[in-house]
Amino acid sequence: MADEDAALIHDEAREGMEKAIRSLKAELQKFRTGRASVALLDGIQVDYYGTPTPLNQLANLTTPDPRLIVVSPYDKGAMTDIEKAIMKADLGLSPSNDGKVVRVPVPPLTEERRKDLVKQVHRAAEDHKVGIRESRRDALSMLKDLESEGALPKDDKHREEKKTQALTDAMVKEVDAIASQKEEDILQV
Protein backbone atom coordinates (compact mmCIF):
# COMPACT_ATOMS: atom_id res chain seq x y z
CA MET A 1 0.00 0.00 0.00
CA ALA A 2 2.75 2.45 0.97
CA ASP A 3 4.70 1.67 -2.20
CA GLU A 4 1.62 2.35 -4.33
CA ASP A 5 0.99 5.67 -2.58
CA ALA A 6 4.63 6.68 -2.97
CA ALA A 7 4.54 5.71 -6.66
CA LEU A 8 1.40 7.81 -7.17
CA ILE A 9 3.04 10.79 -5.47
CA HIS A 10 6.15 10.33 -7.64
CA ASP A 11 4.04 10.10 -10.81
CA GLU A 12 2.09 13.20 -9.84
CA ALA A 13 5.33 15.11 -9.23
CA ARG A 14 6.71 13.97 -12.61
CA GLU A 15 3.49 15.06 -14.32
CA GLY A 16 3.67 18.53 -12.73
CA MET A 17 7.32 18.91 -13.71
CA GLU A 18 6.71 17.77 -17.29
CA LYS A 19 3.83 20.24 -17.51
CA ALA A 20 6.24 23.03 -16.53
CA ILE A 21 8.64 21.95 -19.28
CA ARG A 22 5.88 21.82 -21.92
CA SER A 23 4.78 25.28 -20.84
CA LEU A 24 8.34 26.59 -21.15
CA LYS A 25 8.70 25.15 -24.65
CA ALA A 26 5.42 26.78 -25.72
CA GLU A 27 6.43 30.12 -24.21
CA LEU A 28 9.88 30.09 -25.83
CA GLN A 29 8.40 29.44 -29.28
CA LYS A 30 7.00 32.95 -29.22
CA PHE A 31 10.46 34.51 -28.88
CA ARG A 32 11.90 35.82 -32.14
CA THR A 33 15.18 34.28 -33.20
CA GLY A 34 15.83 36.42 -36.26
CA ARG A 35 14.30 33.79 -38.52
CA ALA A 36 10.70 33.84 -39.65
CA SER A 37 8.52 31.29 -37.90
CA VAL A 38 4.75 30.94 -37.91
CA ALA A 39 5.04 30.33 -34.15
CA LEU A 40 5.65 34.10 -33.82
CA LEU A 41 2.01 34.63 -34.72
CA ASP A 42 0.63 31.98 -32.33
CA GLY A 43 -1.81 33.41 -29.86
CA ILE A 44 -2.82 36.36 -32.05
CA GLN A 45 -6.57 36.86 -31.89
CA VAL A 46 -8.30 38.54 -34.83
CA ASP A 47 -11.60 40.38 -34.32
CA TYR A 48 -13.49 38.46 -37.00
CA TYR A 49 -17.07 39.74 -37.29
CA GLY A 50 -17.05 40.68 -33.61
CA THR A 51 -15.64 37.35 -32.40
CA PRO A 52 -12.00 36.96 -31.26
CA THR A 53 -10.67 34.15 -33.48
CA PRO A 54 -7.15 32.66 -33.55
CA LEU A 55 -5.22 33.82 -36.62
CA ASN A 56 -4.30 30.25 -37.62
CA GLN A 57 -8.02 29.45 -37.96
CA LEU A 58 -8.59 32.33 -40.38
CA ALA A 59 -5.57 31.92 -42.63
CA ASN A 60 -2.84 29.67 -43.91
CA LEU A 61 0.54 30.73 -42.46
CA THR A 62 3.75 29.97 -44.36
CA THR A 63 7.41 31.01 -44.33
CA PRO A 64 8.64 31.03 -47.94
CA ASP A 65 12.03 32.40 -46.85
CA PRO A 66 13.85 33.01 -43.53
CA ARG A 67 12.81 36.67 -43.34
CA LEU A 68 9.13 36.54 -44.35
CA ILE A 69 5.84 35.15 -43.07
CA VAL A 70 2.98 35.01 -45.56
CA VAL A 71 -0.58 35.01 -44.23
CA SER A 72 -3.13 33.78 -46.81
CA PRO A 73 -6.62 34.45 -45.42
CA TYR A 74 -9.42 32.03 -46.29
CA ASP A 75 -11.78 35.04 -46.37
CA LYS A 76 -10.28 38.04 -48.19
CA GLY A 77 -12.66 40.30 -46.25
CA ALA A 78 -10.70 39.60 -43.08
CA MET A 79 -7.45 40.96 -44.56
CA THR A 80 -7.52 44.34 -42.80
CA ASP A 81 -8.61 42.77 -39.50
CA ILE A 82 -5.66 40.36 -39.71
CA GLU A 83 -3.29 43.23 -40.44
CA LYS A 84 -4.63 45.22 -37.45
CA ALA A 85 -4.34 42.20 -35.14
CA ILE A 86 -0.69 41.63 -36.09
CA MET A 87 0.09 45.32 -35.51
CA LYS A 88 -1.77 45.29 -32.18
CA ALA A 89 0.17 42.21 -31.00
CA ASP A 90 3.21 44.47 -30.48
CA LEU A 91 5.75 42.01 -31.91
CA GLY A 92 7.71 44.68 -33.73
CA LEU A 93 6.40 43.42 -37.07
CA SER A 94 4.95 45.56 -39.86
CA PRO A 95 2.51 43.62 -42.04
CA SER A 96 1.67 44.74 -45.57
CA ASN A 97 -1.45 43.82 -47.49
CA ASP A 98 -1.37 43.36 -51.28
CA GLY A 99 -5.05 42.41 -51.64
CA LYS A 100 -4.38 38.65 -51.81
CA VAL A 101 -2.04 37.94 -48.91
CA VAL A 102 -0.58 39.72 -45.90
CA ARG A 103 3.21 39.75 -45.96
CA VAL A 104 4.97 40.05 -42.63
CA PRO A 105 8.69 40.79 -43.05
CA VAL A 106 10.77 39.72 -40.04
CA PRO A 107 13.55 42.29 -39.59
CA PRO A 108 16.92 41.13 -38.29
CA LEU A 109 17.36 41.55 -34.55
CA THR A 110 19.69 44.24 -33.23
CA GLU A 111 22.40 43.21 -30.76
CA GLU A 112 20.61 45.08 -27.97
CA ARG A 113 17.31 43.34 -28.74
CA ARG A 114 19.07 39.95 -28.80
CA LYS A 115 20.50 40.57 -25.32
CA ASP A 116 17.07 41.64 -24.06
CA LEU A 117 15.49 38.48 -25.49
CA VAL A 118 18.16 36.33 -23.82
CA LYS A 119 17.29 37.98 -20.48
CA GLN A 120 13.61 37.18 -21.09
CA VAL A 121 14.51 33.56 -21.89
CA HIS A 122 16.45 33.26 -18.63
CA ARG A 123 13.55 34.82 -16.71
CA ALA A 124 11.08 32.37 -18.29
CA ALA A 125 13.38 29.43 -17.53
CA GLU A 126 13.71 30.52 -13.91
CA ASP A 127 9.92 30.89 -13.58
CA HIS A 128 9.46 27.34 -14.85
CA LYS A 129 12.16 26.01 -12.53
CA VAL A 130 10.07 27.45 -9.71
CA GLY A 131 7.12 25.40 -11.00
CA ILE A 132 9.29 22.27 -10.95
CA ARG A 133 10.42 23.01 -7.40
CA GLU A 134 6.80 23.53 -6.34
CA SER A 135 5.97 20.06 -7.66
CA ARG A 136 8.89 18.70 -5.62
CA ARG A 137 7.74 20.54 -2.50
CA ASP A 138 4.21 19.15 -2.90
CA ALA A 139 5.55 15.62 -3.33
CA LEU A 140 7.79 15.90 -0.27
CA SER A 141 4.87 17.26 1.74
CA MET A 142 2.67 14.32 0.72
CA LEU A 143 5.45 11.86 1.60
CA LYS A 144 5.78 13.51 5.02
CA ASP A 145 2.02 13.19 5.53
CA LEU A 146 2.17 9.49 4.63
CA GLU A 147 4.96 8.99 7.16
CA SER A 148 3.07 10.83 9.91
CA GLU A 149 -0.01 8.69 9.22
CA GLY A 150 2.17 5.63 9.68
CA ALA A 151 1.54 4.45 6.12
CA LEU A 152 5.17 4.94 5.05
CA PRO A 153 8.21 3.83 7.07
CA LYS A 154 10.95 6.41 7.62
CA ASP A 155 13.50 4.54 5.47
CA ASP A 156 11.05 4.33 2.57
CA LYS A 157 10.29 8.03 2.94
CA HIS A 158 13.99 8.90 2.66
CA ARG A 159 14.34 6.67 -0.41
CA GLU A 160 11.34 8.36 -2.07
CA GLU A 161 12.67 11.80 -1.17
CA LYS A 162 15.94 10.95 -2.92
CA LYS A 163 14.01 9.73 -5.98
CA THR A 164 12.02 12.96 -6.03
CA GLN A 165 15.18 15.05 -5.73
CA ALA A 166 16.85 13.11 -8.55
CA LEU A 167 13.78 13.70 -10.74
CA THR A 168 13.83 17.40 -9.86
CA ASP A 169 17.53 17.69 -10.73
CA ALA A 170 16.94 15.98 -14.10
CA MET A 171 14.02 18.28 -14.94
CA VAL A 172 15.96 21.41 -13.96
CA LYS A 173 18.82 20.26 -16.22
CA GLU A 174 16.31 19.83 -19.05
CA VAL A 175 15.01 23.38 -18.51
CA ASP A 176 18.59 24.67 -18.60
CA ALA A 177 19.27 22.77 -21.83
CA ILE A 178 16.10 24.12 -23.48
CA ALA A 179 16.94 27.69 -22.39
CA SER A 180 20.55 27.49 -23.58
CA GLN A 181 19.42 26.14 -26.98
CA LYS A 182 16.99 29.04 -27.34
CA GLU A 183 19.69 31.49 -26.25
CA GLU A 184 22.00 30.05 -28.91
CA ASP A 185 19.25 30.45 -31.55
CA ILE A 186 18.67 34.07 -30.54
CA LEU A 187 22.34 35.02 -30.52
CA GLN A 188 23.01 33.36 -33.87
CA VAL A 189 23.37 36.06 -36.52
Image (cartoon, rainbow, N blue to C red):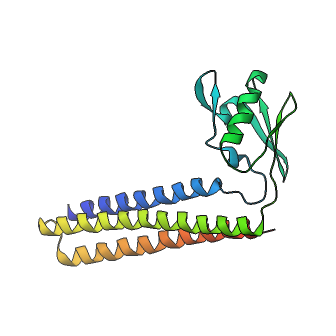
Residue 40: x and y in percent read 69, 49
Left-right relation of 119 to 130? right
Left-right relation of 125 to 160? right
Give whichever of 6, 21 is nearer the camera: 21
Residue 15: x and y in percent read 41, 57
Q: Is residue 62 above or below residue 180?
A: above
Residue 168: x and y in percent read 42, 71
Give whichever of 127, 161 is nearer the camera: 127
The residue under the point 73% across, 51% down is 92
The residue under the point 13% across, 68% down is 148
The quadrant of the rendering that contains the C terminus is: bottom right
Q: Is residue 132 above or below residue 43?
A: below
The quadrant of the rendering that contains the N terminus is: bottom left
Residue 12: x and y in percent read 35, 57
Give whichever of 82, 36 is nearer the camera: 82
The residue under the point 68% across, 70% down is 115
